[in-house]
Image (cartoon, helix red, strand yellow):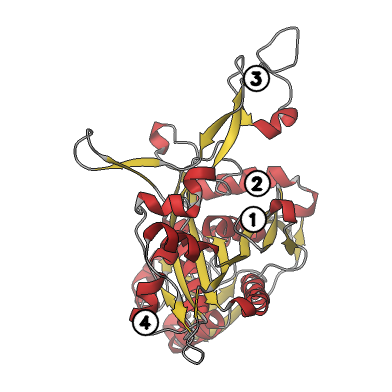
Amino acid sequence: MSHDVETTEVDRQPLARMDELVSLCARRGFVFPSSDIYGGINGFWDYGPLGVELKNNLKSLWWRRVVRERDDVEGLDSSIVAHPRTWEASGHVESFSDPMVDCRACKRRVRADQRDDAGPCPSREGTSEHDWTEPRDFDLMLRTQIGAAAEGALEAHLRPETCQSIFTDFKRVREAARQKIPFGIAQIGKAFRNEINPRHFTFRSREFEQAELEFFVRDAERASWFEYWLDERVRFHRDLGFGDESLRVREQDKDELAHYCNKAVDIEYRFPFGWQEIEGIHDRGAWDLSRHSEFSGKDLSVTDESTKERYLPAVIETSVGIDRTCLALLAHAYHEETLEGGEARTVLRLNPAVAPIKAAVLPLSKKLAEPAERIARELRREWNVFFDVAGNIGRRYRRQDEIGTPFCVTYDFDSEQDGRVTVRERDGMSQDRIAIAQVRSYLGERLESAF
């Protein structure tokens, strides 16, 4: 059975929808402020029971596509704290800061080049102008200390990006894995930046997670590998469900490029607050390996076995923001609908491959809980499955719609006699009556084809 759906979301203000998405994330346990009982801490977020499943599913898909399905990419999980010389070689110590100004009256802090966009000062009567201080550099790296005693402790930084350890571990990984150029090293991990103004929920945070690939190539092959990885990464996001109306590719202008970058392309998603980058593809040349060779005194060059030529490989980088992509998935999936008869429902149309819960098992009555629980236990061997016996069946369906569960399996009184259950699909609300013995294969066929 299917139901006609009239979508009303098109009339809503984008930022109002964003507020409601943030509210849903907190209420249903996707994402909420870290240390919430103490008022939170700006720029830090905790992923709850549903959020961690969504995030892990996304990371698993990325790892499968980038690492496990290939024989030319190796995995890595490096330390969050690196030797301080790492950040000297990378250029972060020298240049990873922003010139900032503060208003002496209202205490607002902005980047020096954004003063004209700051608006009027709310604390100065008789004038709307801010009373700015002189610009001064603001360190974007978070500092820490290594050592038990305060005196003599080594000052270090929490890594501002995950890629640098890939470069410092390049030689060891290549030799241990017996890889030849071209090949890549990939890792997923936390990074930290002392953002001046964290904003847009989890989009710009001080603690965030990256999934990065550094693919090492000969210099003459940079252009072809750049296009190859750009196509691969766009395909990944398309497979997640982002269409032409919500995903675009934008090449950076020369004045936007980082100093080490020969070319950069951003994959952008259309958030309620505008087009924003969720992944970057960069031609970094041989800059990183050359700098780490210079600062460490270690030769990171490789030998061409056919010509015996020694050279430093160039690097094509793909870097996706896990938190940003999770936010894009949630924003893209969020819908409010009016059903036939006037009933409203909120639904997250998440790709089943990333949905936190793959199926919910719902006995029609508490009297049917025991046989329904047996079905749930069987399905949990494969997927994250929720069991819910509280409330009427319509209300339970709505709860699962709101968190993006693609399938609900209802065990009713007829199931005792005919050995069948009803499987309801989230988006179209169609229902199939199938044998209990077929539920596992029925779900598997649809979940495995989702990505």
Label 3 sits on a secondary structure element that is loop
Amino acid type, callout 3: Trp
Q: Mark 3 = which residue?
A: 132
Is 141 in front, or is 87? 87
Which numbered marker is on residue 99?
none
Is 323 in front, or is 331? 323
Label 2 sits on a secondary structure element that is helix
| C-beta proximity under 8 Å, tags 1 and 2 | yes
Say which of marks 4 and 2 sits in front: 4
**Residue at 61% across / 27% down in the picture?**
135
Residue 168: image quadrant is bottom left
Q: Mark 4 = which residue?
A: 177
Q: Residues within 10 Å of mark 3 (few under 14, many from 20)?
A: some
Q: Position of residue 346 (x, y in %)?
A: 63, 55
On the question of residue 363 being in view, the answer is no
Q: Is residue 198 above or below residue 387?
A: above
Residue 350: image quadrant is bottom right
Residue 335: image quadrant is bottom right
Disc nearer the start of the sequence (1/2): 2
Q: Position of residue 155 (x, y in %)?
A: 32, 41
Disc nearer the start of the sequence (4/2): 2
Label 4 sits on a secondary structure element that is helix
Left or right position of 325 against 38: right
Which numbered marker is on residue 18?
2
The span from disc 3 to disc 2 (Cα, nearest Å) is 32 Å
Residue farthest to the left? 148
Amino acid type, callout 2: Met
Q: Mark 1 = which residue?
A: 331
Q: Position of residue 148 (x, y in %)?
A: 19, 40
Say which of marks 3 and 2 sits in front: 3
